[in-house]
Image (tube, helix red, strand yellow):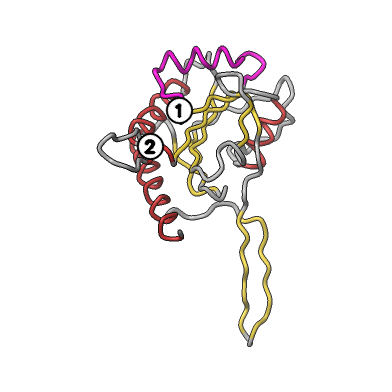
Amino acid sequence: MPGYYHMESIDSQQSGGNMKIDTLYHRISNLILTNQFGQKISLDSDLKGKILVIDFFFTTCASICPKLTGNMKLLQKSFRKDPKKEASLDTVVQFISITVTPERDSFQALRKYADHYGVNHDNWSFLTGDKKTIYDFARNELNVSTGPGDGGADDFIHTDRFVLIDKDRFIRGYYKGTSDSEARKCADDIVLLTMEWKHVK
């Protein structure tokens, strides 16, 4: 199974002559942004119980973003609805692309970008909103940027990572989104998480 990332704290104590260590892993906080249809989307309420794959991009990017979007689309295709099966994974997984230039990327621009790539809007949200909120989430919740910043006008995050989040909002994987092999690994790990979920249920 995919591991857990980012320990929040470790509590250790002596028990029967042995050191007992309790590890707490970071659970991401809620995020509310606007999707490509102008609707407010909450990770905790609107996408409750969903496995999430999150990346960061901007619509005018000519370097890594087209490849990121292309590989995310391949992931989405891997989990598209199969009419031959009663239960399909397309209802379990939600793909999320968050713009890092929200001052330029309106929800209308996101819709145009998504349509250009022919994505299925049912389980792929393109999100925009307050820059400070987005940058704080990227840095302090998903840990995809090692550099300092305040989300101001001169701050810029440009990461090639896909981040896999389980239904309980724990980080379960980081993948280089420009790598076809790592995108396939992400797809495999999504399947494993669905198996973990069924086992727990």
- Please name the residue that numbered disc 1 is placed on: 122
Q: Is residue 112 magenta?
A: yes
- Seen from the viewer's position, the closer of residues 71 and 38 is 38
Percent position (x, y) of residue 121? 46, 24
Of the numbered discs 1 and 2, the one sitting upstream in the chain is: 1
Residue with the most extreme bottom position: 16
- Seen from the viewer's position, the closer of residues 25 and 106 is 106
Please name which of the two marks, 1 or 2, marks the residue nearer to the observer: 1
Instruction: Locate the C terminus by quadrant.
Output: bottom left
Residue occupying the point 48% across, 46% down: 173
**Amino acid tagged 2:** Ala
Q: Is 60 drawn above or below residue 21 in the view shown? A: above
Which element carries disc 1, helix, strand or loop?
Answer: helix
Percent position (x, y) of residue 12? 67, 72
Q: Which residues are magenta?
A: 101-121
Q: Is 42 drawn above or below residue 170 in the view shown? A: above
Instruction: Locate the N terminus by quadrant.
Output: bottom left
Tag shown at residue 157: none
- Please name the residue that numbered disc 2 is placed on: 183
Residue with the most extreme front position: 86
